[in-house]
């Protein structure tokens, strides 16, 4: 298995799109001109502020790094450094002088087991292998000229998917998903198992709670989530559990279904279209309104349970006897086409996800409801397997 084979599809797609962006190309040209004048001083700074971990000083860490280098196909010589800090942290720097540099905080080296460190090393090397430094997020977001809001949101979204790719690289090196989950728990909490006994099920259950909260009116992903470059650790663990069940890790789930599942998980950190004041959000709301009515009416009329969930999305008085249900149902295809043209695939998935929720309100998804959902999925260019994933996931939440 090559490192390129396990890269997250959305990471690669957004990476390729961003590299062609005019603002990204401009910043990369500025960086290239600066580098042409001489080294940026990364190695000099590391040597003066950190301790280099030579094979003689840290033979176990060097050996683990060698294993990760081989598994991921890293070709450049690697230098490891440690600096004093109470925070768990690690970083991989852009290569300089044909060398690659990875730095760890002292607390991370002391608080992580050997296998957990292997995941961290693999994760950091993954950023290099996938050329993530080619999209200079820091320069773009903290430079004198800030990017436009659309590019900024795209950069944040890409960064989160880039972390998913790096996590897969780390998991490929560690070859133990329980170890990987404990590593992410430590990074998220700052705790070690000496203080708290780690429970994978309880940790990942936070994602389920986030989903439950986000389904309540006005409780969608807050702006702080939209502007985060790292997905919340339980989301990363859930994404990795999907990876573990995929054919990429020796499981049976197809790569396509894996990426659909990951998109669904990370959509929890994207803006809520129910409150957003954009044309895209309006198109999404219009599709959801018509879609919920059509799905609810598909199996012998709209039930009280379905009306209750409808009210959660649009308010208590949104549904009245004056609505022409048949006329609204006829608009579903047209509204789905509008969403397909304006929204991202992830946004379209969120609407379809919400339609699946109401389809289950009366105890399950009937055949007629399933047909309608599949028609909407087709109009949105979303594989029908996504419907199965949402339905099964919601059952697991119960």
Image: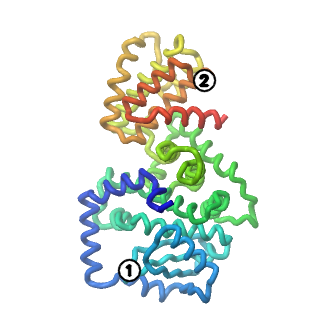
Secondary structure found at label 2: loop
The answer to which quarter of the image holds residue 22 is: bottom left
**Where does residue 235 sit, x and y in percent of width and height?**
56, 51
Residue sitting nearer the eye, 175 or 200: 175
The quadrant of the rendering that contains the C terminus is top right
Residue drawn 44% across the image and 37% down it: 349
| Label 2 vs 1, first from the N-terminus | 1
Inspect this view and state whether residue 189 appears. no
> Residue at image x 50%, y 42%?
257
Instruction: Give coordinates of residue 347: x percent, y percent.
Output: 41, 39
Question: In x, y percent, where is residue 27?
Answer: 27, 67
Q: Residue at x 51, y 73 (%)?
A: 69
Numbered disc 1: secondary structure: strand
Above or below, 23 against 97 in this view is: above
Q: Residues within 10 Å of mark 2 (few under 14, many from 20)?
A: some
Q: Are marks 2 and 1 in contact (CB under 8 Å)?
A: no
Q: Which mark is residue 364?
A: 2
**Which numbered circle lies on residue 383?**
none
Q: Which residue is mark 1?
A: 96
255, above or below 60, in the image: above
Instruction: Please tell me whether residue 300 is drawn above or below residue 37 in the rendered image.
Output: above
- Residue 341 sits in which quadrant? top left
| Residue 95 in sight from this viewpoint | yes
């Amino acid at each position: 298995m090559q490192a390129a084979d396990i890269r997250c599809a959305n990471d690669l797609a957004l990476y390729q799109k961003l590299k062609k962006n005019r603002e990204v190309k401009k910043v990369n040209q500025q960086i290239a001109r600066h580098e042409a004048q001489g080294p940026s001083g990364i190695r000099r700074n590391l040597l003066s502020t950190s301790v280099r971990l030579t094979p003689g000083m840290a033979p176990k860490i060097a050996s683990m790094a060698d294993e990760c280098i081989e598994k991921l196909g890293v070709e450049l010589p690697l230098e490891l450094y440690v600096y004093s800090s109470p925070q768990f942290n690690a970083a991989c720097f852009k290569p300089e002088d044909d060398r690659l540099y990875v730095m760890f905080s002292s607390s991370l080296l002391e608080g992580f087991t050997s296998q957990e460190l292997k995941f961290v090393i693999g994760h950091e090397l993954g950023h290099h292998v996938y050329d993530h430094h080619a999209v200079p997020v820091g320069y773009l977001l903290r430079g004198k000229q800030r990017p436009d809001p659309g590019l900024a949101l795209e950069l944040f979204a890409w960064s989160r998917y880039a972390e998913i790719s790096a996590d897969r690289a780390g998991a490929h090196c560690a070859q133990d998903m329980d170890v990987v989950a404990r590593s992410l728990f430590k990074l998220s909490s700052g705790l070690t198992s000496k203080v708290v006994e780690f429970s994978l099920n309880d940790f990942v259950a936070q994602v389920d709670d986030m989903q439950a909260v986000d389904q309540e009116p006005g409780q969608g992903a807050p702006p702080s989530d939209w502007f985060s470059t790292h997905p919340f650790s339980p989301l990363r663990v859930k994404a990795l559990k999907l990876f573990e069940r995929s054919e990429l890790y020796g499981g049976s789930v197809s790569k396509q279904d894996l990426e659909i599942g990951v998109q669904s998980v990370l959509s929890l950190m994207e803006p809520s279209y129910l409150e957003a004041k954009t044309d895209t959000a309006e198109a999404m709301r219009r599709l959801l309104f018509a879609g919920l009515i059509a799905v609810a009416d598909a199996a012998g009329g709209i039930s009280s349970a379905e009306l209750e969930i409808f009210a959660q999305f649009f308010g208590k008085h949104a549904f009245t006897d004056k609505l022409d249900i048949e006329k609204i149902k006829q608009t579903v295809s047209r509204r789905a086409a509008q969403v397909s043209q304006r929204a991202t695939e992830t946004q379209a998935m969120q609407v379809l996800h919400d339609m699946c929720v109401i389809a289950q309100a009366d105890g399950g998804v009937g055949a007629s409801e399933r047909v309608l959902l599949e028609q909407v999925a087709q109009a949105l260019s979303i594989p029908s397997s996504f419907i199965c994933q949402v339905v099964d996931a919601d059952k697991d939440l119960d």
